[in-house]
Amino acid sequence: MKLILALIRKEFIHLRRDPRLLGFIIVMPIILTTLFGIALKLEPDNVKMAYVDKDPSFFSNLIKTNIWSEGYFDLYEVADVEDIRNEIRLGHARAGLYIPKDFSAELIENNQPSVFLYIDGTMPSLATAMDNNSSAITDEAVTTDMYFSDPDGPAIVIAQDPFNLEVETLFNPDKIETWFFLPGVVGILIMQVALILTSTTVVREREGNTLEQLLVSPMMRSQFIIGKIIPYVIISLIDFYAILGFSWMVFDLPEPNSHAVLFLLAVTYLAALISMGLAISTISQTQQQAIFISIFVLIPSILLSGFIFPVEAMPSYIQPVAYIIPFTYFVEIIRGILLKGNDLIELMPYFLALCAFAVFFTVFSIFRFRKTLS
Amino acid sequence: MTVTIETQNLTRIFGDFVAVDKLNLSINSGEIFGLLGPNAAGKSTTIRLLAGILRPNSGEASILGFNLFTQTELIKQRIGYVAQQFSLYPDLTVFENIMFYAGLYGVDNQNRLHELLDLYDLIQFKNKNAGLLSGGYKRRLAIACATTHDPELLFLDEPTAGIDPVTRKELWDLFYSLSTNGKTLFVTTHYMEEAERCNRLAFLSHGKLVAQGTPIEIRGSLKDRRIYSSDIPHDPVLTTALMKSPGIQLVNQFGSELRIITDTSVSPEQLQYLIAENYKIPFKLQAVTPSIEDAFILLTSNGEKQ
């Protein structure tokens, strides 16, 4: 028993001697709990919806204002149906609403006109939420109101189901479950590999005393950092294609229109991740700390990136967190390339964001990496 | 003779601890220069300052004719450094380690790499993981890795610490062969017998230089003192009594030998009498020539009684 006590005491001493680690253990979960507690909910709100209202009327307004519960959608107007598809394709909108011409006239005639709803089939939480709620647009709130007539028009009586709702799921029409998550999962797996591999690499040289031997050599710090980035980009690129290739073969994930574009964007994403891993390594004192910081980055990357919940559905003060996560951009890229058929021009903003990450973290690592001991 | 290393008032402070205090060193080219001092005297800090991987708080230094602070990169091409701890990649083989360090210095001559394997007797372990080598061979490998670019100046931080005497002699043979090839070696050690092997040496105590010169000059610094050896085993009463007496500077026990250093105010007869007063067993006492160790202990204890 005394022996075990001695061991227990020693472990607590180790922890106390590493106050940074102690900080990670206590502060990190609190930050993440706060973040997720605020940001995560299954019911999205403020989801961007592009609409075309060819029949601006009392009835179309009724639909626009009542479409699901208040605040669920953030509506903005576009010119035509094609624009709706395009806005969703570019990721500007996650859903679309088309109210055709003569809607109110048909409604008054009791001809059960159709209203068209478009959904981004690459957003898992949205598509399933739509599934569960697609009848809600004709819910009592709307239909009951429709029994009352337009106060400016003649009195009318409207049938039980006044209109049809035609839902079209874009880019994943059959709502294949694996298509929702698999492209993003590829990005997550590779992020995990890249971060854990590289975040320990500089600090390992420090712990193993080899850093000192490197520092006396004529090597420049930029050479050191670039010499660390390139091999890990190559390794994780091979890994990326292994995972993706497996997904293509086993899960019938769609292939991109252009493999060259996918390759370019994958390399950029990996360069961003690996330079981020190196930046973590240069600020860590031990490998243990490096791994903790990596996990601290990984978990919010998965949950806040738009991989599960649309970023715009999060509270506005949490959204900046999403935009400093490289995966937020890559999840749009990989869904865009594999499912929506986006080309490089369309993905340019995301590509540039990843380039900015890669440059920022590389420069940060170079400056952070000291050529002298302290 | 040209000067390879010259420092003026080199100082390095960690927090409120002065690790190296206004150090003035001068090392000639082609010599094996030994830096001696007790643990925490500032030997490793000095070597790191001179190798350019630690910045001093103040002072000047020139290495191989270059300014240490403005021409660091030029110096790095021309020096080698072997750290105190094993600082190679344990999961790489002997040859892979050598190849890696050669790459860092832009050495791509395969003959040079095999020459190093030969010189350091590492051929037999060429494909063995470096982490699996014995202590002596790890040092050999570390030196091989630090000299791929054939540096003019080699810093060795405690190269023989924890190494058995036979291997230590072999390492010193290597140092001599490097030295005869015109290389300058800067070695730290706390083994006294190794001090005698150096061409010149310096003593460091609490970051301060307390002596610098050839082994003969260092021993000569004790010329105004008298050194005695006697066959008395450890006797705490006697030691305490001696240290209380005026004129006695150091009492040092070596197994069954007691070494006593006095100043010239104490005559041999007085010492004889002083011992006999406190030690009732017959003993021998004879004046001896000072050893480096006598000088080392006396100088690093700041001339105070121990």
Image: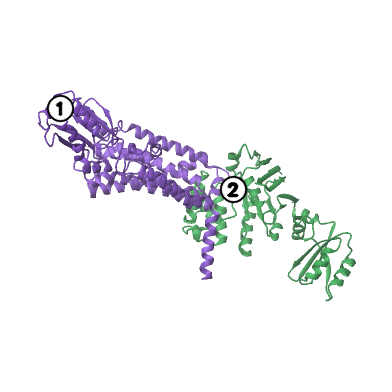
Chain colours: A purple, B green
Judge if badges 2 and 1 mark residues of a common chain.
no
What chain does badge 1 belong to? Answer: A
Q: Is residue B56 above or below residue A102?
A: below
Residue A12 on image: x %, y %: 52, 59
Q: Is residue B133 visible?
A: no
Category of crowding for the residue at label 1, using alpha-carbon neighbours closer than 10 angstroms: few (below 14), some (14–19), many (at least 20): many
Residue at image point 75% right, 67% down: B253
Q: Which residue is mark 2?
A: B80
> Dividing the picture into quarters, in which one does residue B238 lie?
bottom right
Q: Which residue is mark 1?
A: A104
Residue B87 on image: x %, y %: 54, 53
Q: Amino acid at mark 2?
A: Gly
Mark closer to the observer (2, 1): 1
Q: Is residue B270 left or right of residue A362?
A: right
Residue B98 on image: x %, y %: 51, 51
Category of crowding for the residue at label 2, using alpha-carbon neighbours closer than 10 angstroms: few (below 14), some (14–19), many (at least 20): many
> Dividing the picture into quarters, in which one does residue A72 lie?
top left
> Dividing the picture into quarters, in which one does residue B84 lie?
bottom right
